[in-house]
Image (cartoon, rainbow, N blue to C red):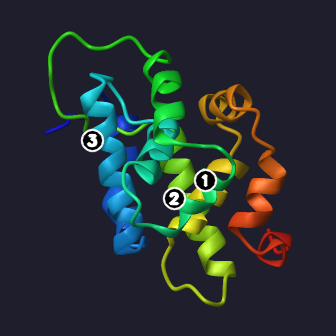
Amino acid sequence: MYQPKDAADAAMYAKVPQLFSRVSPDTDTVLVRAAGQATSMHHAFQGPEHILLGFLVKNDNPMYDVLRSFGITYESVRPIVEQMHLPVIAKRIVEKYTQSVLDAIKEAITIAERDTMATVAQPKHLLAALLLTGDINVAQVFDSLRVDRDALLAKVIDPSILAKH
């Protein structure tokens, strides 16, 4: 189990259960798969770039087909993400989220609150949040694949929801 390194770290992680209670089971599945991807690469943390892989591991969420329609596949994203971090020596399960992941989850919840069709953050809200939060690693993945992020965002979520942003 992850042990916070200081009071600020402990305060940040105290909010994690509250965040996860506001995401749908499908979104939770994406996040669990993202942690699995970070673990399989022996990365020390789960970052937003791992969430992209969480969307692409299996074809059982609506964002899988949207991402693939833009040429974003598991096979194209994983090598990019693997090169972003040095692997940790000890094999362990990744239990620590970067602040960027927590920010993306918070943003997904905010987007969901504006979406009259949602009571919890759905996968589309999480993907929209990844596009909107401006994480440098996610941007690097999309830039490497020459993805038009604005076009992807428009395909993921109704622009009127974001206009309330």
The image quarter in which residue 4 lies: top left
Whether residues under marks 1 and 3 lie with C-beta atoms below 8 angstroms apart, the answer is no
Dot 1 amino acid type: Leu
Which residue carries the number 1 mark?
A: 67
Residue 135 appears left or right of 82: right
Give me the residue at 77% from left, 75% from top. 158
Q: Secondary structure at mark 1?
A: helix
Whether residues under marks 3 and 2 lie with C-beta atoms below 8 angstroms apart, the answer is no
Q: Secondary structure at mark 3?
A: helix
Question: Is residue 15 among what the camera can see?
Answer: no
Bin the neighbour count of mark 3 within 10 Å (Cα to Cα): few under 14, some 14-19, many 20 and up. many
**Is 152 drawn above or below residue 82 in the view shown?**
below
Of residues 147 and 108, the one nearer the viewer is 147
The Cα–Cα distance between marks 3 and 2, rounded to whole angstroms, is 17 Å
Residue 86 appears left or right of 107: left
**Is 102 drawn above or below residue 21 in the view shown?**
above
Give me the residue at 69% from left, 33% from top. 139
Which residue carries the number 2 mark?
A: 64
The Cα–Cα distance between marks 1 and 3, rounded to whole angstroms, is 20 Å
User: Mark number for residue 36?
Assistant: 3
Question: Residue 164: horizontal and vertical position, in percent?
Answer: 82, 75
The image quarter in which residue 91 lies: top left
Q: Secondary structure at mark 2?
A: helix
Whether residues under marks 2 and 1 lie with C-beta atoms below 8 angstroms apart, the answer is yes
Quadrant the N terminus occupies = top left
Of residues 8 and 138, the one nearer the viewer is 138
| Label located before the other in sequence (3 or 2) | 3
Dot 2 amino acid type: Tyr
Give me the residue at 51% from left, 58% from top. 64
Instruction: For marks 1 and 3, give the one nearer the viewer.
Output: 1
